[in-house]
Image (cartoon, rainbow, N blue to C red):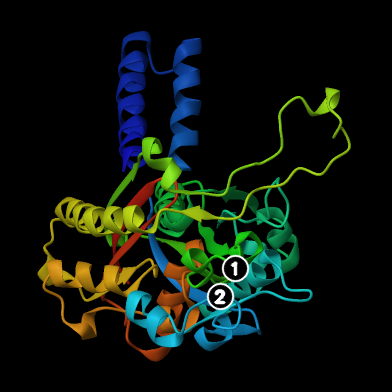
């Protein structure tokens, strides 16, 4: 929105000023400032404001999965205990050669194929993840894997809110006029950072990735209708996986040691209360910005963290079961991957159709939370 406003105002104001200069000094004269203004107007015109829409979606899951019964052999739990508290029945886990890059690339290729866009025509790749294969990020390795040789690629770290924040960012890049095709990928492989003997976390997390290709359209047809995004670092301690080695590595005994991170630590009750409180708030703000109400929502597309959180939000908005998408029973909490994966499955099944109003929301570590209203 901010970018769109700047782009729309600048060219006209420059042209008006420049015309006045030419009128005073004669038709054939230009000051250096006038020549600079003309050049600026020409450059700005090439970045005409556009709208953004979702043109294709994709997903990828690891082959191996663990059921609740499988976990009962690792920790003291059972299928009924997990399912009644979370809604989760199983979760997929990377093995062998699988990686965040391989999952992200597979999801991205699906999205491109369904949008009928070639990889070399992608201008930007945004990878939302907290678990890259390389500490410097995995967006560039996905770029190479899919052959998007002309795209800028970077990682965005906002945990379970990442994909929603990525969608908003991707749309803004297009709306500013500089990009036509933006690939937004959300994925995580948090099984690497789970203590598989900790019942409080191992029952929750799975691996997976999803993708959406955003393409440019007319400004008045932009699919992003409203958004709302927040962070509260003072509550960070409720969900962390912190670096565990000491500082001063060059001078210490572990000068050649390997840096590493702790397994995930979570205060489940605090995170649950945070989600139940913030999801209705942020979606309501996005609806207000879009000039809509809950009655306009065709599908509620939430981060798949806990079925009780999804049900609570649906109840707050008065949404019936057919207006809520959920696949948490099959995949568990795939962090940044959960929203694009459930979006993709809903599109594939026909549950989400062209023209539907979608209310996206993500929430999680940071703590961060975000929502967006899209017309699909």
Q: Secondary structure at mark 1?
A: loop
Category of crowding for the residue at label 2, using alpha-carbon neighbours closer than 10 angstroms: few (below 14), some (14–19), many (at least 20):
some
Where 120 falls versus 30 (above or below)? below
x, y (%) of residue 365? 44, 50
Instruction: Residue 89: give x, y in percent of width and height.
Output: 45, 85
Looking at the image, which is closer to me, 136 or 147?
136
Where does residue 281 sit, x and y in percent of width and height?
19, 53
Residue at coordinates 71% horizontally, 28% vertically from top-left? 247
Q: Are marks 1 and 2 in contact (CB under 8 Å)?
A: yes
- Measured as percent of width and height from the top left, residue 266 is found at 46, 54
| Residue shown at 50% from the left, 69% from the top | 199
Q: Which residue is mark 1?
A: 197
* Residue in front for this viewpoint, 252 or 140: 252
Q: Quadrant of the N terminus?
A: top left
Disc 1 to disc 2, C-alpha distance = 6 Å
Q: Can you identify the residue that label 2 sits on?
A: 75
Residue 156 in sight in this render: yes
Which quarter of the picture shows residue 255? top right
């Amino acid at each position: 929105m901010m970018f769109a406003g700047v782009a729309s105002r600048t060219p006209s104001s420059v042209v008006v000023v420049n015309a006045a200069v030419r009128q005073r000094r004669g038709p054939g004269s230009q000051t250096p400032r006038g020549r600079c203004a003309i050049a600026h107007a020409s450059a700005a015109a090439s970045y005409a404001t556009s709208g953004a829409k979702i043109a294709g979606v994709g997903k990828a899951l690891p082959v191996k999965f663990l059921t609740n019964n499988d976990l009962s052999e690792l920790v003291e739990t059972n299928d009924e205990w997990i399912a009644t508290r979370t809604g989760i029945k199983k979760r997929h886990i990377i093995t062998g050669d699988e990686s965040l890059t391989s999952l992200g690339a597979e999801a991205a290729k699906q999205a491109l194929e369904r949008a009928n866009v070639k990889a070399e025509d992608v201008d930007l790749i945004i990878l939302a993840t907290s678990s890259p294969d390389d500490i410097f990020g995995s967006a560039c390795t996905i770029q190479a894997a899919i052959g998007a040789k002309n795209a800028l690629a970077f990682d965005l770290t906002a945990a379970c809110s990442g994909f929603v924040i990525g969608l908003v960012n991707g749309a803004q890049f297009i709306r500013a006029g500089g990009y036509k095709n933006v690939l937004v990928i959300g994925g995580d492989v948090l099984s690497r950072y789970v203590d598989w003997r900790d019942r409080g976390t191992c029952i929750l997390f799975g691996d997976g990735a999803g993708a959406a290709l955003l393409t440019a359209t007319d400004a008045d047809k932009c699919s992003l209708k409203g958004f709302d995004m927040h962070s509260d670092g003072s509550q960070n301690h409720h969900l962390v996986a912190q670096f565990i080695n000491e500082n001063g590595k060059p001078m210490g005994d572990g000068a050649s040691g390997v840096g590493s991170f702790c397994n995930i630590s979570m205060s489940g009750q605090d995170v649950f209360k945070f989600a139940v409180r913030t999801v209705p708030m942020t979606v309501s703000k996005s609806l207000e910005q879009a000039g809509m109400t809950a009655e306009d929502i065709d599908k509620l597309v939430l981060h798949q963290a806990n079925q009780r959180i999804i049900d609570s939000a649906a109840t707050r908005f008065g949404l019936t079961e057919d207006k809520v998408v959920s696949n948490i029973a099959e995949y568990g909490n795939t962090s940044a991957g959960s929203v694009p994966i459930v979006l993709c499955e809903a599109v594939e099944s026909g549950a989400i159709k062209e023209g539907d109003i979608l209310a996206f929301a993500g929430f999680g570590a940071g703590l961060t939370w975000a929502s967006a209203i899209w017309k699909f």
